[in-house]
Amino acid sequence: MRNPAGVATDADGIGAVGPGPGPELIDPPMLQVTRETGASIGLLYLLDPADETLRLATLVGGPQSFAGLWARVGLANRTPVSDAVRDDRLVWLGGPEDTARTYPRLSLVLPYDFSLAAAPITSGGRSWGGLVLFLPGAHDPQLSLRERSTVRAACHRIGVLLREAAEEGCPLPWEREPRALCPPRTRLHGPGEALAAAGLAERFPEASFALDLDGRFTFVTRAAARLLGAEIPVLLGSRPWNALPWLGDPLFEDSCRGALISLRPTSLTTLRPPDRWLSFELYPDPSGISARVTAAPAPVDADTPAARLPEAAGKDRAVALYHLLHLAATLTEAVGVQDVIDQVMEQMLALFGVQGVSLLTTEGDRLRIIGYRGYTEELMAELDMAPLTMGNPAVRVMRTGVPGFFATVAELRRFYPAVEVRDTKAAWAFLPLIASGRPVGAMVLAYDRPHPFPPGERSVLTSIAGLIAQALDRARLYDAEHDLAITLQARLLPRALPEIPGLDVAARYVPATQGIDIGGDFYDVISLGAQMTALTIGDVQGHNVNAAALMGEVRTAVRATAGASPSEVLARSNRLLVDLDPGLLTSCVYAHLDLARHRAHLATAGHPPVLLRRPGGGTELLRVPPGPLLGVERDARYPTIEIPLPPGTLLVLYTDGLVEARGVDLDEATAALADHVDRAGDLSLEELADALVEQARSSAPRSDDIALLLTRVT
């Protein structure tokens, strides 16, 4: 079979390997661009036009775990490679802070010291995929012109190879697993030299070992085996965290992965049970890791997890990752802006050891404080609505997108001599809140004591700010949509019920959904003069703008024909809906009240039955002969019944949201509603309306709106 891209596939959709070039066709340019740029890892993605997915085809250097993490990337996702391919541009991330600012989720998964370049691969007017290069942490913040030219040339060469293969009728097949390449060694050793190197390592008193790109032991000295407590044959070919249970803590594996990605040496100290401490020094290059292990004294505070941290990493990455995930999960539950503010204030103080936190946005040409903790109300009132001047560090980070970290008061004053420090804090982090490439505010973290900000912590805090910015942006959109929904719903329902002599009326409307999902329930009380009044209630299928718009049309149609008999009002409204053909069904009850004769006429279009409570007590369901739903059959008829309305009679009109709930029998729920109305006694209609709605909402979860109209003859 063939997919829309014209690539021959097998039954599983994987490219069938046939005659013609294989994936090795693009090995040379991939190895060349990785070598010439000094990249620690190179990734080649091919675009599958069938499902707009980028599939990892080739991995140069780096641990094999990368293949599992990044095997498939949706073209619509927000990642460096998808952005590069979708927007046809080079994406450059000049370090961990830049990554955390632009792609906080990527920084969360890879909290290491690296730079990254992602570029599109195009040829013949078609996009073929993308190239990703991880460059060592020591790389300059900017990509040089020579490096840009190298990347462009590699992308052009790969694109031409892919296009020519496709034009020759043998496009590169989709492989089930990415092709893993090891960068060529700069120096090859013969057997004799390799034996001499092993002997050299054995004669040194230091214990050492080597790991390949996937973390497997490739060489272990006898001294290292003794310190690790395992035989050399057991270690060779295995991973440390598998062969040595006491190294099963993710910390060691994380340190190895971070060293390979950043190509920076790192070290850590860990406990070999029961009481022996070992220090590891890891020296990476594109082919793997050389490690030295030595006995180490017990840390001063050996009972705390901090004793086992990589010495070059600052804060424990595992703890930082937990905090990030915890905050991300918490923010997903936040709905409106105030929810986000409350969660941020609580989590930042509880999880990150800060003593003060504030969130700021702009309002006109002023700085607006929208939330804070750890400060006095008086101080915040003084700082709120400050002018937007670049002499303010919060304003600067919002306008430049570059975070500011100040370990001491002196450091803050050195950069901002005009700033007056009005609080008692001693260190600050000013973090930009950037969502979709635009600033939405700033977050300020403050510490009571001087606080150094190592690179790892700066990256984590910047990632947190990115998560908060996205949550705040979503919350603002939700608040705007929610306000729009409330306004629209209010416009479609009566602003106030008319005062009609001889009648007491009350109404309630309770939406069951949030955001822009507004319902189609409606009610109305129409004064017809000469002691004539019409009551109506209805429910349009659905919870969206279309349902609300149709609800407005039905209510208008009923009002336009009110005064005719109930059967005629429903018949005319039905014909209008059939002509409109909205694709939505509507139930409705219409009642015509003659207060002079104390009589009422009712007709229904598939609506729940009206409840009637008699003056002396006793509540019953009015069995009105049902007519079909509005909008189904053009010539439908709607039978009418007549009932007496002596003073004290109560009519209860409602939509099914008042009685329907998952797992609740409808007849039992309607009977319970009638019983509640019967026991209402001398409650006012306002009190009774509140009681009925509260009972419905507390008895079971509701998935539908509630509309309720109560009318008592006085």
Image: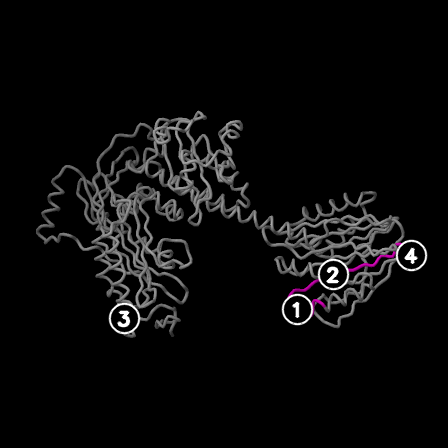
- The residues tagged by marks 3 and 1 sit, at their Cα atoms, a distance apart of 53 Å
On the image, the x and y values in percent for residue 341 come to 51, 39
Q: CA distance from mark 1 to mark 2?
A: 17 Å
Residue labelled with disc 2: 588
Marked residue nearer the N-terminal end (2 or 4): 2
N-terminal label among 3 and 1? 3
Q: Amino acid at mark 4?
A: Arg
Residue at disc 3, secondary structure: helix
Tag 2: amino acid: Cys
Q: CA distance from mark 2 to mark 4?
A: 25 Å
Q: Which residue is mark 4?
A: 597
The residue that label 3 is drawn on is 165
* Mark 3 neighbour density, 10 Å: few (under 14) some (14–19) many (20 or more): some
Which numbered disc, 1 or 2, marks the residue that appears first in the sequence?
1
Q: Is residue 223 above or below residue 526?
A: above
Sequence-wise first label, 3 or 2 = 3
